[in-house]
Image (cartoon, rainbow, N blue to C red):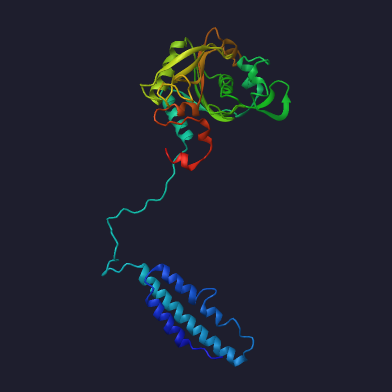
Amino acid sequence: MKLDTEAIKSEAKEMLEKSGEPGSLAEWHSKYLGKKGILRTLTSDVSDLAVEEKKELGRKVNELKSYLEEAYAGSLNSVTSIKKDKPLENFYKTLPGKKPEIGHLHLITQAIREINEVFSKLGFIRVRYPEVEWDYYSFEALNMPKTHPARDEWETFFIDLPEDPKLGKVVITPHTSNGQIREMLKGNLPIRMLNISRCGRRQSDINHVPTFYQFEGLVVDKNISITHLKGVLEYLIYNFFGKDTKFRLRPYDFRFTEPSFEVDVTCGICGGKGCRFCKEGWVELGGAGMVHPNVLKAGGIDPEVYSGFAFGWGVERVLMMRTGLKIDDIRYLFENNLKFLEQF
C-alpha cells in the first residue's frame, strides 16, 4: 500500500497557514485529526495487508500524526496568545468587557428582609413557628368556634393524618397567628414578636394565591393600647411605602382581637384613583386589633394585668402596594418567570 505522506503534509501546511482564526483551526483539526479525518481513514482498512506492509503503514501514520499535532499546536498558540511586540489588531483595551449575568434575591425575599429590618428597630424579635400545625393553635386557642367558616374544608387545607384528642386535626396553617399562642405559652413577658412564615388557603385570583407569606406582629405588656398599635402600623407604612402613602383603620370582626380593624392603604398601582386590582383606590393589607382576653388566657396570661395588640399581613400584598412596582396580579410573584423577575 503506497502512502504519500509528504503530499498530505504539504497540503495540511498550506491550509494551516491560511487558518488565522480559531474557527478555521477547528475546521482544519476536524479534517486531519478528527474522528472522521484523513489520519483516521488511512488505517480504516488494513485487513488485506501483509504483516510487513502493516508495520510500514503504522510507522508512516505515526510520523504523520506527530507532524500534524505539532503543527496544529503551534498554530493554535500563535492565534490565542498576544505577542508583546505586536498587539492584536482591532483590540481596544478601553472597550468595556461583557459582564456575566448576575441574579438577585427574589422580590418576596427582599420584602421579608426589609420588613424584618423595620420591626427590628422597634425591638421586635423574629421567630419561626410550624407551617404545618394543629387545629388548636390555628383556631381553637384563637377564640374561633368550630362553626367558624375559616375552619371549613373549603377554606383550609387539612392534612390526612390522625387527629389528636386534645389538639385536633393537622392543617397547613392558614395564618401566622398560630405563633401568638406558642409565643405566649413560653411565659417570657413582655412580648415583641415578629413571626414570618408561609401559609395556605384555598383561594386563587389576582388578589389571592393558595400559598403565600405572612408576617405576624404581637406585643403583650402592661398598659398596651390602640394608640401603640396605630403608632407601630404608621411606622411600618411610612418606612416601607413612604410618607405619601395614606392608610386607614376600618372596624371589623376578628375572633382573636377585640376591637378589630382591617388596615387599608392607598393603592400603589393606581395611586388611589381606582384600578382592576383595588377597585376604589384602597387596598386591604391585613387585620389588626387588641388581643382578645380569651386568647391571652389560652396563652397563660392574665388579661386583668396584661394587654396587647396583634396584626397579620400578607408579604406579597404589602410588596405589591409599593409605589412604582405596578404589579397588579399577585400570581406573577409565584410563577418564577425570568422575564418578569428581571424587571426588578
Q: Quadrant of residue 26?
A: bottom left
Outermost residue, top side: 304
Outermost residue, left side: 85
- Expressed as whole percent of the image width and height from the top left, the position of residue 298 reads 61, 15
Q: Quadrant of residue 296?
A: top right
Instruction: Give the vertical position of 35 relative to 324 (above or below).
Output: below
Q: Residue at x 45, y 34 (%)?
A: 110
- Expressed as whole percent of the image width and height from the top left, the position of residue 130 reads 60, 29
Total marks in image: 0
Report the front residue among 57 and 37.
37
Q: Quadrant of the N terminus?
A: bottom right
Q: Residue at x 62, y 14 (%)?
A: 143
Report the front residue among 26 and 301.
26
Instruction: Give the vertical position of 287 relative to 72 (above or below).
Output: above
- Expressed as whole percent of the image width and height from the top left, the position of residue 21 reads 38, 69
Q: Residue at x 47, y 81 (%)?
A: 66
Report the front residue among 183 and 209.
209
Q: Quadrant of the C terminus?
A: top left
- Expressed as whole percent of the image width and height from the top left, the position of residue 276 reads 48, 25
Q: Residue at x 37, y 67 (%)?
A: 80
